Amino acid sequence: MSETGKAAPDEARLNAFVGRMLGDMGATMNAATALVGDKLGLYRAMAAAGPLTSAELATRTGTVERMVREWLAAQAASGYVEYDPISHRYVLPPEQAMVLADEDSPVFLAGFFDIAAAAFRGEAKVSAAFKSGKGVGWHEQDVCLFCGTRRFFRTSYLHQLVGSWIPALDGVAAKLERGASVADVGCGEGASTIIMAKAFPNTRFVGFDYHAPSVEVARQTAQAEGLGERVSFEVAAAKTFPGTGYDLVACFDCLHDMGDPVGAAQHVRQAVAADGSWMIVEPMAGDRLEDNLNPVGRVYYAASTMICTPASMSQEVGLALGAQAGEARLRAVVTQGGFGHFRRATETPFNLVLEARP
């Protein structure tokens, strides 16, 4: 014990934690440089280009060499690119290119940096919400959150949704192949809706979201993809979206953001057909806090603190499930909403895929 009565710090543990903080500081600062690289196309220009000097990369991207030189040094220090001190050239290895440059890659993650930027830009509002308890609406967050969410979650949807998630549901894939009616509730900018629509040309899809700017982006994307009248998007909340008799209602990574998820579940129960299904995709989480103290939980708890929980608290009821709600709490929400059948259909390291039926 020290003279003040406080326990003296363990020097080894202190040094270890300072070292960890140094790593976190580097990661935090370089998140901004990664955002620059993504937005300016620097990673995409390096992909499959072979070794480049800073001048060559600047020429390829229409940027200023001195800024590119400093950016490359930061990327090399982070291990995002590799540097050859003899040739003074940099290369983006194929593994890093899959993560940072290829939006159709199964491990593309660069969209996350937009979400991180939104968290920083929304800090003042979230800090105020800590005092007021009023929350911060999704629509009140920085605009980069919306496209960042689409780009980040699209990776899983593109590579998992049609190939494994829908086939894990009871009889749903066959219905969609024959022709069915699907509501994608909380669709955001429409990535999930459009991926399903392209895979099942005999089925009609409608995406609902309360955030009008996201719905407009979804409409424009569907038009550009040539999906015609078979796919539509409407501004509507989860508790009030129109229509009944849906063969499938889907909620992708959004139920925990809702202020009244039980009310949303009750509305879905009224909207789904008697033999229909509700697919609920949520962030992977165990039911106990200690189950989630891992790298995936670290990301989701942080995002939940800055985005998801304040979003729920800004709405009526404000249940604030959080992004690490876990299957047991989600089951309670769904069964309170009137569904008689609930099961975990499948999972990934990042997602729980749940199925509810009347």
Image (cartoon, rainbow, N blue to C red):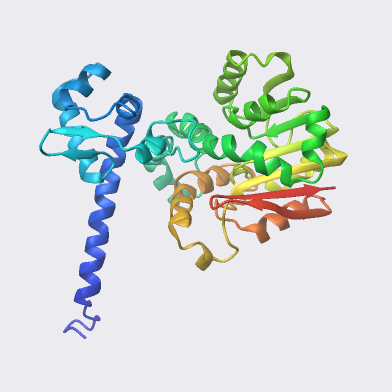
**Residue 21, can we see it?**
yes
Left/right of residue 106 with respect to residue 114 in the rendered view: right
The spot of residue 261 in percent (x, y) is 68, 47
Q: Nearer the viewer, residue 159 or 307?
A: 159
The spot of residue 56 in percent (x, y) is 19, 21
Q: Which residue is pictured at 69% across the width and 20% down the height? A: 232
**Residue 235, can we see it?**
no
Q: Which residue is pictured at 35% across the width and 30% down the height? A: 38
Q: Nearer the viewer, residue 276 or 305?
A: 276
The spot of residue 306 in percent (x, y) is 44, 46
Q: Looking at the rendering, in which quadrant would you find the N terminus?
A: bottom left
Left/right of residue 241 with respect to residue 75 in the rendered view: right
Q: Which residue is pictured at 72% across the width and 25% down the height? A: 206
Q: Nearer the viewer, residue 244 or 12?
A: 12
The spot of residue 85 in percent (x, y) is 11, 39
Q: Nearer the viewer, residue 269 or 222?
A: 222
Number of residue marks: 0
| Residue extending furthest toward the right | 274
| Residue extending furthest toward the left | 86
In which quadrant of the rendered view does residue 227 lie? top right
Left/right of residue 318 with respect to residue 341 in the rendered view: left
